[in-house]
Amino acid sequence: MPTYRDEVVVLRTHKLGEADRIVTLLSRRHGKIRAVAKGVRRTSSRFGSRLEPFMVADVQLYQGRNLDIVQQAESLGAYGADIAQHYDRYTTASAMVETADRLNEAEATPQQYLLLVGGLRALARGDHAARSVLDSYLLRAMALSGWAPGLGECARCGTVGDHDFFLAQLGGVVCAACAPAGSPRVARDTVALLRALIAGEWDVVDAAPERTTAAASGLVAAYAQFHLERGIRSLSHLESSR
């Protein structure tokens, strides 16, 4: 059908001409969409504010030859304002949408859409520490894309147990026999926190000491960026603020 509706998260926007904007959207049923929102930069625009980054909307689009065209937009989740008021939430949300943009180059799934919406909602409400929300999102998003880290057994030989090494290039925790010489050790409470992050055990995550949280964040960032094959630019702002 030339016209269709879907629920979307706005990932990023670019100016086009004097009044238009190109928007990149992660949708619930149609994957990632690039569309033109005509006239949204004018003060008289009826839905310009609904197509800002981190906003969730119900949109109607017309299928174009190269880019679709946004015809209508109704707000479903106005998370942008609450996120933008806090620097840590803003940089965290930027890293999340950047990751979603990268992961869904080929084909998105409804689960990826729902995961991102849930993460942005938690950020806007301040339910948990912003960096913990990001770490949980990154681990879950990577798992949905087929890159779940091995945390309960050696990622190389499959030996079950608590292991003392974590290597992104090998896929998660590895045993002493599989770890290359000189590999840095990882504390077992850090690995336990990684399990809690990917399982959504927020009582465990929220109670973790800052030292453990920082160590887990470093491992999550290294793992995600290794499998994405290039850095997540927004993470550098998070690290500098920390």
Image (cartoon, rainbow, N blue to C red):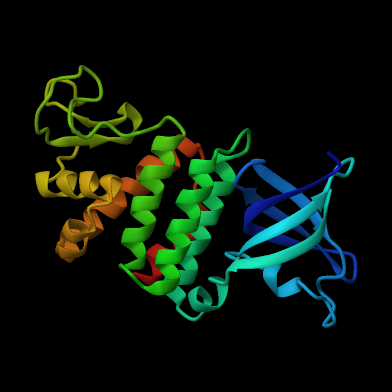
**In the shown orientation, is residue 232 left or right of residue 151?**
right
Q: Position of residue 102 (x, y in %)?
A: 57, 43
Left or right, 89 with reference to 94: left
> Looking at the image, can residue 237 be seen?
no
Depth order, front residue of 136/241: 136
Which residue is drawn at the image coordinates 18% and 32% (left, top)? 152
Quadrant in the picture for the C terminus: bottom left
> Is 72 situated left or right of 65 in this image?
left
Q: Position of residue 132 (x, y in %)?
A: 31, 60
> Splitting the image into 4 quarters, where does residue 151 fall?
top left
Residue extending farthest top: 157
Closer to us: 49 or 87: 49
Which one is nearer the viewer's eye here, 95 or 127?
A: 127
Q: Is residue 77 above or below residue 187?
A: below
Residue 192 in picture, x, y percent from top left:
15, 46
Percent position of residue 111, x then y: 48, 42
Would residue 146 be found to the left or right of residue 67 on screen?
A: left
Q: Residue at x 39, y 57 (%)?
A: 134
Residue at figure coordinates x 22%, y 44% from the top left: 195
Q: Quadrant of the N terminus?
A: top right
Residue 63 visible from this viewpoint: yes
Q: Residue at x 89, y 40 (%)?
A: 65
Within the image, what quadrant is residue 140 found in? Answer: top left
Is residue 24 depicted above or below 183 in this figure? below
Q: How many marks?
A: 0
Q: Is residue 205 above or below residue 180?
A: below
